[in-house]
Image: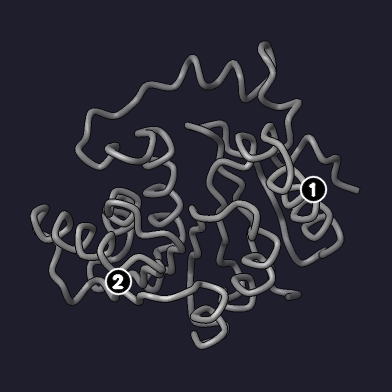
Amino acid sequence: MIPETSIGTGPLDRPGSMLGDARGSIGHAADPAEESIDGSAGAALRFLATVLRAKSVVEVGSGTGASASWLLRGMVPEGVLTSIDIDAAAQHIAREALAAQGVPRSRTRFIAGLAERVLPKLTEGAYDLVFVDAMPAKYPAFLELGAPLLRPGGAIVFAGPVDAAQRQEPRAQALRELTRAVRADESLVPVALPVGDGLLAIARTEQS
């Protein structure tokens, strides 16, 4: 069994713990993309996209385009990132920010809508990476909807699981549900990455 502390719950973030110590030792990249995401977390996303040789990526939560920028730099040159957000105005800002960085519009697909309605419409098994950085209270639902989209060997990544765990309900309750769901599914392999506010990366194995 996987202990809850090994996949991103509170004890990892205490002073003197693995996550608490790592935060103090990891530098922050001086990059425009860290506008709305910690530089070390962004670098981790880029690393994951590179290792996976990601061609198709989904992000839930467009933000200012910062996480998309990191992900696109790790993806293969012809890769396409699909960004989902309920706020069309925010997506416009993200789109323009990426264009200003020289990202071709053909490399992004912005979908305005509720993620829980959009994700089921995407093709199962067709994505290398799913990144979730919106509505922590819905993380368990996003795991259920996002994991089937992954090819075997792909990964779904949740932003700030430790931060969410330390807040009051319903976020803490949602994280507990997410933890239980991951532990109960032997086809999912999780790891807590001690960068920024924490990332919870979950790989989908061949047995999914």
Q: Is residue 191 above or below residue 140?
A: above
Q: Is residue 21 left or right of residue 166?
A: left
Kind of residue at disc 1: Arg
Where residue 158 is drawn, which disc sits there? none
Q: Residue at x 42, y 59 (%)?
A: 61
Q: Residue at x 20, y 58 (%)?
A: 93
Q: Residue furthest right?
A: 1
Residue matched to label 2:
79
Q: Is residue 11 above or below residue 138?
A: above
Q: How many marks are shown on the rendered structure?
A: 2
Where does the image place residue 29, in percent across and percent down from the top left?
29, 29
Quadrant (top left/top right/bottom left/bottom right) for the C terminus: bottom right
Where residue 176 is drawn, which disc sits there? 1
> SS class of the residue under badge 1?
helix
Q: Could you tell me if the residues under marks 1 and 2 are in contact, i.e. CB atoms within 8 Å?
A: no
Q: Residue at x 76, y 26 (%)?
A: 11
Q: Residue at x 8, y 55 (%)?
A: 100
Where does the image place residue 26, in percent across and percent down from the top left?
44, 22
Distance in Å between CA atoms under marks 1 and 2: 34 Å
Q: Quadrant of residue 167?
A: top right
Q: Is residue 150 above or below residue 129?
A: below
Which label's residue is closer to the chain start, 1 or 2? 2
Disc number lying in front (1 or 2): 1
Kind of residue at disc 2: Gly
> SS class of the residue under badge 2?
loop
**Mark 1 Cα shell of 10 Å, populated few (<14), some (14-19), many (≥20):** some
Where does the image place residue 108, in percent across and percent down from the top left?
26, 71
Where does the image place residue 157, in percent across and percent down from the top left?
55, 54
